[in-house]
Image (cartoon, rainbow, N blue to C red):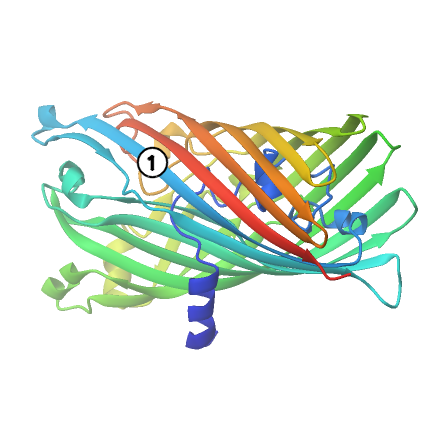
Amino acid sequence: MSKVIRLFVVFLFLSTSVWANGLSLNSIGPRALGMGGAVVGLANDYSTLYWNPAGLRNLEGVFIGGYFTGIMPTGTYQADFTPFGGEAIDTETKSNMYPSPGLIGHWVCMLNDKLTIGLGAYVPAGLGAEWDGTDLRSLSGGTSLNWMSKIGVVNISPAVSYQVSESFSVGLAVNVFYALFDLDRPAEVAPNTFAQYSESSTGFGYGVTLGAHYKVNDMIQLGASFRTKTDVTMSGSGENPAFASMGAPTKSDFDRDVSWPLWVAGGVAVKPVDNLTLTFDVQYSQWSASETEFVTEYKEAAWKQALEPTGDNKFVLNWKDATQLRLGAEYRINDMATIRGGFYTDPAPGPDETYNILFPSIDYNAFTGGFSLNFDNLVVDAGAEYLLGSERDIPFGTYADAVPGKHNMNIFAFSIGLGYRIR
């Protein structure tokens, strides 16, 4: 990818720092966010390209929609290292707002009115955290060093949906991932002696999403969606000034394989009265097959000799599979205004034994709400969610690969969208 295109991606589709639980964003699009992401069975707005591409057949004419999502996490970490000659830690992640925009359009095929075509560019995934190194000196030999991780993905996704019968449709979306991975962390170069390690990498990956949607009757709709595991080989360079003392290059190119998990979802939408719709989704992510460990293959011989025998080129995760339960509600006040609400559970895939502050993994309960306003061909959507985290307490001296102490995170996110019906 040229430098010009990369800058375009970074500025227009920036995915940084903390998304809840792993390498999948919880809510794509303001309508879905307002309903707790329980939209696989409903599948009735442009974000269905991500959630269930079969739902494109539920949409009419030509439409283009764009949205901006802002995510504001607050992570906390407490630990008492004074018995070990260090300092007590009581700190928070840096206060930042991380943007996640998207642009999605769809239109009915002129050659076949049973076929609907879609195209999207959006941020479906990300993970990371940023801490003040001064507060974490007890983790880096009393030295203030940078602690930051940032994994993000931009997905360019063409999609198609076909109406098999009046009640049943199927869909396919092709996912072209462009991933970015930046990392700053202390590197132990001798017992209790640390240097600043920094790296940056990018990579491409490809996968597909398959969807199905069935209208049982005017009251009940069913949906199912399946997204393949997507493997991405990241290529970049790392820097560690400590190698200068060995007479070796302080920079090395590297490759690293990163995967986004297989995802399966099923949902139902029920309309008990004319203006009210209730939804329920079950969404499963197979983290155990994708987030086991990140292995970095450095190109410089001195780096390989120093890091591979000790396993310091590996970042162990051993994440577990996780299932989210999602509930949503939508009430149409009149032809102009609709309000929404939702709730979902988001269990942490990361186990205690590998918990790390650079890749936080917390159990969440999420509460959501939103609304839409329709002005003829113009649609304004808004949604918000608050993810309430459950504190994790990692005991000292129990796990060799875990950061001990009390960890938690709460996240507030909002999303504003604007759509236009061309015809």
Label 1 neighbour load within 10 Å: few <14, some 14-19, many 20+: some
Query: Label 1's element?
Result: strand
Residue 178, percent from left and from top: 51, 62
Q: Is residue 315 left or right of residue 417?
A: left
Question: Residue 24: in sight, yes or no?
Answer: no
- The residue wearing badge 1 is 74
Residue 53 vs residue 199, the one in the foreground: 53
The kind of residue on which mark 1 rests is Thr
Q: Is residue 108 left or right of residue 421?
A: right
The residue positioned 50% from the left and 29% from the top of the image is 347
Labels in figure, total: 1
Q: Is residue 122 left or right of residue 202?
A: right
The residue positioned 67% from the left and 38% from the top of the image is 337
The residue positioned 71% from the left and 46% from the top of the image is 52
Residue 153, percent from left and from top: 49, 56
Residue 344, percent from left and from top: 56, 28
Residue occupying the far left of the picture? 85
Q: Is residue 318 above or below residue 149?
A: above
Residue 331 vs residue 87, the one in the foreground: 331
